[in-house]
Image (tube, rainbow, N blue to C red):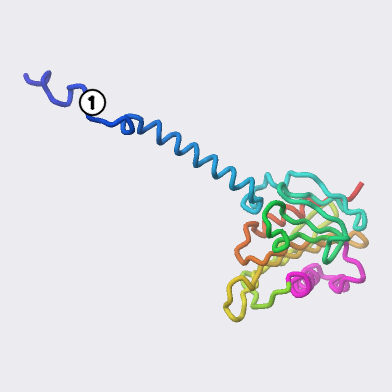
């Protein structure tokens, strides 16, 4: 009784809709697709944005002949030899950012010329190394915050990584940084790797650099 005449059973009248409204769902799908493409393009053009991903560790390897190391080169980075390294025998910087020198990875052997090499304890050596690269390479001063100490291990052996954020004492933005230093291996194979950035909120986490250290191998 009356149910056959219920208004909700009547077909919807779309005659009053504009062409844009009729294309609404399709337009939304196109917009979402364009947004996804823009995100991909921004990631590709800015390697730092993809640094935390494990997949970025699966790039090429750089042979550091002076240190006897095979060092993984993250996707979106390039590796240079001792002639470009401010400290150590390898320098890696992200490509295509225009600010490559504000972020870098340095590596080498713990040789007598490195003051940290005289410290037998890996944690003490990593701490000293972090102080050296902070002062003489990164060139920033301030208070240490978010200090992290963690074990690392590579083909060369076990070791320790020390990382922290440098907070400017005067509170000025842009004058702090992030420092990571790892010392690992034994005897003549004792080596190190450092990650430096003038950004206090750098994309890679210390654990990402831990995994980078873990992928270091002996050359040859």
Q: Which quarter of the image is occupied by the N terminus?
A: top left
Q: Give the answer, above or below, for where 39 lies relative to 150.
A: above
Mark 1, other Cα within 10 Å: few <14 / some 14–19 / many ≥20: few
> For this rendering, which residue is in front, 102 or 59?
102
Tell me what residue is drawn at x 72 percent, y 56 percent. 210
Tell me what residue is drawn at x 45 percent, y 34 percent. 30
Is-magenta flag for residue 117?
Answer: yes
> For this rendering, which residue is in front, 146 or 133?
133
* Numbered marks: total: 1
> For this rendering, which residue is in front, 73 or 124?
73
Q: Residue furthest bottom?
A: 170
Q: In the structure shown, which secondary structural element does the residue marked by tag 1 occupy?
A: loop
Is-magenta flag for residue 137?
Answer: yes
Q: Quadrant of residue 3?
A: top left
User: What kind of secondary structure does the magenta stretch mostly adopt?
Assistant: helix
211 sits left or right of 157 in the view: left
Q: Residue 155's x, y, as percent?
A: 83, 51
Dot 1 corresponds to which residue? 15
99 sits left or right of 189 in the view: left
Q: Residue 130's x, y, as percent?
A: 75, 70
Q: Give the answer, above or below, for where 181 lies relative to 169.
A: above
Tell me what residue is drawn at x 37 percent, y 32 percent. 25
Tell me where the magenta segment starts and ends, as one range.
109-138
Q: Quadrant of residue 41?
A: top right
Q: Residue 201's x, y, as percent?
A: 60, 63
Q: Residue 127's x, y, as percent?
A: 76, 72
């Amino acid at each position: 009784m009356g149910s056959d005449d219920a208004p909700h059973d009547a077909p919807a009248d779309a005659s009053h809709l504009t062409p844009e409204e009729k294309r609404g769902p399709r337009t939304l799908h196109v917009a979402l697709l364009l947004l996804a493409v823009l995100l991909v393009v921004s990631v590709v053009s800015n390697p730092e944005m993809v640094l935390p991903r494990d997949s970025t560790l699966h790039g090429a390897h750089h042979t550091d002949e002076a240190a006897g190391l095979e060092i993984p080169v993250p996707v979106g980075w390039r590796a240079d030899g001792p002639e470009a390294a401010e400290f150590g025998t390898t320098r890696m910087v992200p490509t295509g950012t225009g600010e490559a020198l504000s972020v870098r990875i340095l590596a080498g052997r713990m040789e007598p010329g490195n003051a940290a090499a005289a410290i037998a304890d890996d944690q003490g050596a990593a701490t000293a190394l972090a102080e050296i690269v902070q002062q003489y390479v990164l060139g920033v001063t301030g208070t240490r915050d978010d200090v992290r100490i963690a074990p690392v291990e590579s083909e060369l052996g076990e070791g320790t990584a020390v990382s922290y954020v440098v907070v400017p004492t005067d509170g000025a933005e842009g004058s702090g940084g992030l420092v990571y230093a790892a010392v690992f291996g034994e005897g003549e194979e004792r080596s190190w790797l450092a990650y430096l950035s003038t950004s206090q909120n750098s994309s890679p986490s210390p654990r990402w650099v831990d995994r980078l250290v873990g992928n270091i191998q002996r050359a040859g």
